């Protein structure tokens, strides 16, 4: 059985590349669990982001959604939404 994480959580839109990706990695290194939201076309980039964050005391959860609909992004991020400490639109 896995232990529940005590890490803070952040939801970041546009997390597959550029500034959103940099913020996701930075917060993961700081111990945040990340709901990395981006369009479904960015699936491979989100998977690579998740793999790059391994080794830190945090997890990046890829969330494929239309990032212009923030409510849907939160609803599709149940692992992070309950303890959301930050929401960043990139």
Image (cartoon, rainbow, N blue to C red):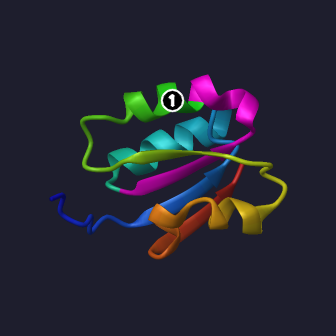
x and y percentages locating residue 82 in the rendered image: 48, 76
Q: Which of 26 and 17 is in front in this view?
A: 17
Is 44 left, or right, of 65 in this rendering?
Answer: left
> Vertically, is 7 above or below 90?
below
* Secondary structure type for disc 1: helix
Residue 56 falls inside the magenta stretch: no
What residue sits 56% from the left and 32% below the top? 46
> Vertically, is 16 above or below 38?
above
Question: Quadrant location of residue 44?
Answer: top right
x and y percentages locating residue 36 in the rendered image: 57, 47
Query: Which region shows up in magenta?
Result: 32-45
Is 51 left, or right, of 71 in this rendering?
Answer: left
x and y percentages locating residue 47 in the rendered image: 51, 29
> Vertically, is 57 above or below 6?
above
Q: Residue furthest front?
A: 1
Residue 62 in sight: yes
Quadrant, the N terminus: bottom left
What residue sits 61% from the left and 64% below the top? 87
Is 86 left, or right, of 2 in this rendering?
Answer: right
Q: Mark 1 points at which residue?
A: 47
Residue 33 falls inside the magenta stretch: yes
x and y percentages locating residue 67 in the rendered image: 78, 51
């Amino acid at each position: 059985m896995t232990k529940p994480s005590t890490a803070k959580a952040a939801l970041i839109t546009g997390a597959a590349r550029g500034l959103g990706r940099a913020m996701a990695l930075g917060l993961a290194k700081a111990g945040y669990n990340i709901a990395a939201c981006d369009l479904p076309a960015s699936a491979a980039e989100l998977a690579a982001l998740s793999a790059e964050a391994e080794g830190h005391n945090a997890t990046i959860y890829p969330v494929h959604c239309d990032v212009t609909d923030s409510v849907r992004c939160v609803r599709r991020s149940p692992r992070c939404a309950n303890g959301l400490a930050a929401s960043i639109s990139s």
